[in-house]
Image (cartoon, helix red, strand yellow):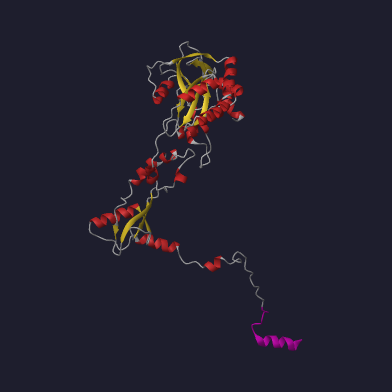
Amino acid sequence: MEPDDINLIPDSEARHHRDCGDSPRGKLRCHDWLGDIPGGMEPCNIVEVQFKNTRKGYYLNSLGLDVTKGDMVAVESVPGHDIGQITMTGPLVLLQMKRAGVRRDAELKRLFRLAKPADIEKYEESRAREEETMIRARKIADSLGLNMKIGDVEYQGDGQKAIFYYIADERVDFRQLIKVLADTFKVRIEMRQIGARQEAGRIGGIGPCGRPLCCSTWINNFVSVSTGAARFQDLSLNPQKLAGQCAKLKCCLNFEVDAYIEAGRKLPPKDVHLETADATWYFFKADIFKGEILYSTDRKIPANLTTIDRRRAWEIIEMNKAGEKPVNLRRDEDVEAEARENRKVDLLDQDNINRFDKKKKKKKRKKPAQPKNPGQSKNDEQKQ
């Protein structure tokens, strides 16, 4: 985080950045657009608290503590308590709960207190053990012959419980694994299965576009992506290009598919062929946003490819319905304009290395002035 960015966040949050170091991921940042609106909304005693990576929870502020965004708090957990950071307060929390599928009348856990220095110290000690625990847990799972991958470990703030996030293509019986992990680490064990997209979001990285992965910055809900989205956008069905770092289809395939579908409705159907006086033209390819269509005289291979705009295509379709056939697929004025643009050019003159040199102009010699009357010049010589 840049030094100038500290001034853009509340004092309590800036204090947390100085004390605890890493800032949370962008996807966990929610802009409270109701925060600066005085009144008009009912008060809310529920706060949103974030934990490691993407985990969030909603807790009841039954004690009426004066908390703001960025404060580190201790919340109720089973067993003991957990340490998290408040990401949202006020009426907007109710909308976030509805989006997350949490019922408003559900029984919520409580917010205990603002985190004390001893709580923060214990919290940091627990986080420091996570990487070592993950490596040892992977070795234990491999020794038990389980077909699973442990992708991340999250310790509770008080260190009494550990959550193991794993990926598996099939159902795994990890009852024996839980017993071994509990005996090894002396904590309560909880196993949570996640998908490949969730793992990529937790790990993070840089996508082929050069920007941080969307799943690690702002995507909260993962929607299934099908190859139909690629077909609508006329993309090559190449798995190496369509797959992201999670080995699944890229989430960004869904971003523009609606715009492609809406623009594609303005084009004529692909199964409609055009009849002209000299040939039958079949749909070959289309540039959806430009509104241009490439037609071929052969149904299977590209032959005599000609590009026309969608208006011309609809004109020919209406003419064919009326029993008429135009002479050419393209308009006459379009053909003339292209002929003017593609006029003949001397290619040899373009390759001449002296074409930019200035040609020297030859100086004309001045002729001596001659008298108008030749006889007058002879009389002058005789006088001399």
Residue that extends furthest to the right in the rendered view of this protein: 384
Residue that extends furthest to the left in the rendered view of this protein: 322
For image coordinates 37% across by 53% down, the residue present is 285
Q: Would residue 29 be visible to someone looking at this image?
A: no
- Relative horizontal placement of residue 123, taking residue 336 as reference (left or right): right
Identify which residue, 178 or 70, lies in the foreground.
178
As displayed, is residue 243 above or below residue 156? below
Task: Name the quarter where the C terminus is drawn.
Answer: bottom right
- Relative horizontal placement of residue 115, taking residue 304 as reference (left or right): right
Q: Which residues are magenta?
A: 367-384
Q: Would residue 368 be counted in the magenta stretch? A: yes
As displayed, is residue 256 above or below residue 49? below
Q: Would residue 95 be visible to someone looking at this image?
A: yes
So how many labels did they put on this image? 0
Quarter of the figure with residue 295: bottom left
Residue 77 x/y as whole percent: 48, 16
As displayed, is residue 253 above or below residue 31? below
Identify which residue, 184 or 340, lies in the foreground.
184
Identify which residue, 372 or 77, lies in the foreground.
77
Residue 319 x/y as whole percent: 26, 57
Q: Would residue 291 be counted in the magenta stretch? A: no
Residue that extends furthest to the top in the rendered view of this protein: 63
Task: Name the quarter where the N terminus is drawn.
Answer: top right
Identify which residue, 22 or 171, lies in the foreground.
171
For image coordinates 41% across by 61% down, the residue present is 338
Quarter of the figure with residue 306: bottom left
Residue 110 x/y as whole percent: 46, 14
